[in-house]
Image (cartoon, rainbow, N blue to C red):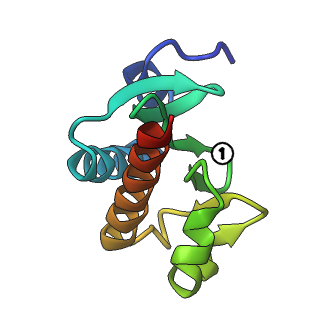
């Protein structure tokens, strides 16, 4: 499969069931980070804020993933994220077990604060 050049292209290539799930996720992320810019990074949709990647998300055959681009999220939201954690830095979910919108907002807002703090130190 050819690497997508836009978020819209990435979403258009998904099966309908995953596309609907990702469109909801995208709206939740964008609402939590209204100043962030969308991009394709590492072959997946991602958002950038304060000059750094904020979060990314990707679809796979049997699941979807949210990548917070920072391990601090797992320390901050340990018990809330634990049921969805897969591997070192991945939050995994499915259409049958989607991520709660409130948790997505918390993760995005924590990442915004982290990126802003790093930008102030630079």
Residue 6 or 11: which is nearer the viewer?
6
Crowding near the residue tagged with mark 1, few <14, some 14–19, many ≥20 C-alpha atoms within 10 Å: few
| Residue 11 in view here | yes
Q: Nearer the viewer, residue 28 or 88?
A: 88
Q: Quadrant of residue 109?
A: bottom left
Task: Give how far across and how far down residue 2 sits, in percent.
Answer: 65, 13
56 shown above or below 99: above
For residue 70, what is the image quadrant?
bottom right
User: Looking at the picture, how far across and down is residue 14, in whole percent?
Assistant: 50, 34
Is 60 located above or below residue 95 in the figure? Answer: above
Note whether 54 is above or below 80 in the view shown.
above
Foreground residue, 30 or 96?
30
57 is higher (above) or lower (below) than 39: below
Q: Which residue is mark 1?
A: 60
Helix, strand or loop at label 1? It is loop
Q: Which percent across, then down, holds residue 79? A: 56, 87
Furthest-right residue in this view: 87
> What residue is drawn where x is 77% and y is 62%?
88
Q: Residue at the spot x=31%, y=72% of the render?
A: 102
Residue depicted at 39% across the width and 63% down the height: 104
């Amino acid at each position: 499969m050819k690497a997508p050049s836009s978020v819209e292209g990435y979403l258009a290539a998904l099966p309908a069931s995953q596309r609907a799930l990702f469109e909801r996720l995208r709206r939740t992320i964008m609402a939590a980070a209204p100043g962030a810019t969308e991009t394709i990074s590492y072959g997946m949709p991602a958002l950038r804020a304060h000059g750094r990647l904020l979060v990314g998300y990707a679809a796979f055959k049997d699941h979807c993933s949210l990548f917070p681009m920072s391990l601090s999220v797992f320390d901050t939201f340990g018990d809330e994220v634990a049921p969805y954690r897969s591997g070192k830095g991945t939050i995994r979910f499915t259409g049958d077990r989607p991520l709660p919108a409130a948790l997505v907002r918390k993760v995005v807002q924590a990442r915004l604060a982290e990126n802003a703090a790093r930008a102030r130190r630079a």
